[in-house]
Image (cartoon, rainbow, N blue to C red):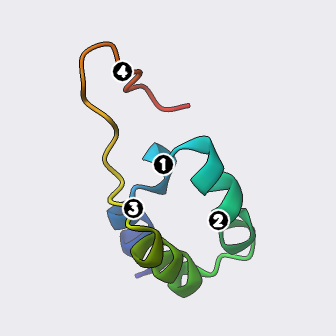
Amino acid sequence: MKLKKMIKLRWWNWDDANINAAMPFLLNNDVSALHDFSSKSGLSGERDASPGANNQPQ
């Protein structure tokens, strides 16, 4: 169940600043807190698809 929630968040597509801010939740495997953080921050997990954007995982 946790894995499905993590995949749905697509946190690996967030920018570096948001990943760093979410690091405590990721390191503690706190999926509920990660989900709350994502919701409060308005993160969709979608990368910028504009021309020239780096759409590759970092």
| Position of the C terminus by quadrant | top right
Give the SS element for disc 1.
Answer: loop
Instruction: Identify residue for label 4.
Output: 53
| Distance between mark 4 and mark 1 Cα atoms | 13 Å
The picture places residue 29, in percent across and down from the top left corner, at 66, 76
Residue 32 vs residue 16: left or right?
left
Given contact means CB atoms under 8 Å apart, are the residues at marks 3 and 1 in contact? Answer: yes
Quarter holding the N terminus is bottom left
Depth check: give the residue in front, 17 or 4. 17
Give the Cα separation between the discs numbered 4 and 3.
18 Å
The residues bearing labels 1 and 2 have C-alpha atoms spaced at a distance of 10 Å
Residue named by callout 1: 14
Task: Give the residue type at disc 2.
Answer: Ala
Badge 3 amino acid: Leu
Q: Earlier in the sequence, mark 3 or mark 1?
A: 1
Structural crowding at the residue carrying mark 3, measured as other residues with C-alpha within 10 Å and reported as few (<14), some (14–19) or many (≥20): some
Q: CA distance from mark 2 to mark 4?
A: 23 Å
Q: What's under tag 1, amino acid-wise?
A: Trp
Residue depicted at x 64% and y 65% = 22
Mark with earlier residue (3, 2) = 2
Disc with the residue nearer the chain's start (2 vs 4): 2
Q: Which mark is residue 22?
A: 2
Q: Earlier in the sequence, mark 4 or mark 1?
A: 1
**Residue found at the very far left of the displayed protein:** 50
**Residue on which the image places disc 3:** 43
Instruction: Report the Cα–Cα distance between label 3 and label 1.
Output: 7 Å
Crowd around label 2: few <14 · some 14–19 · many ≥20 (10 Å)? some
Q: Residue at x 36, y 54 (%)?
A: 45
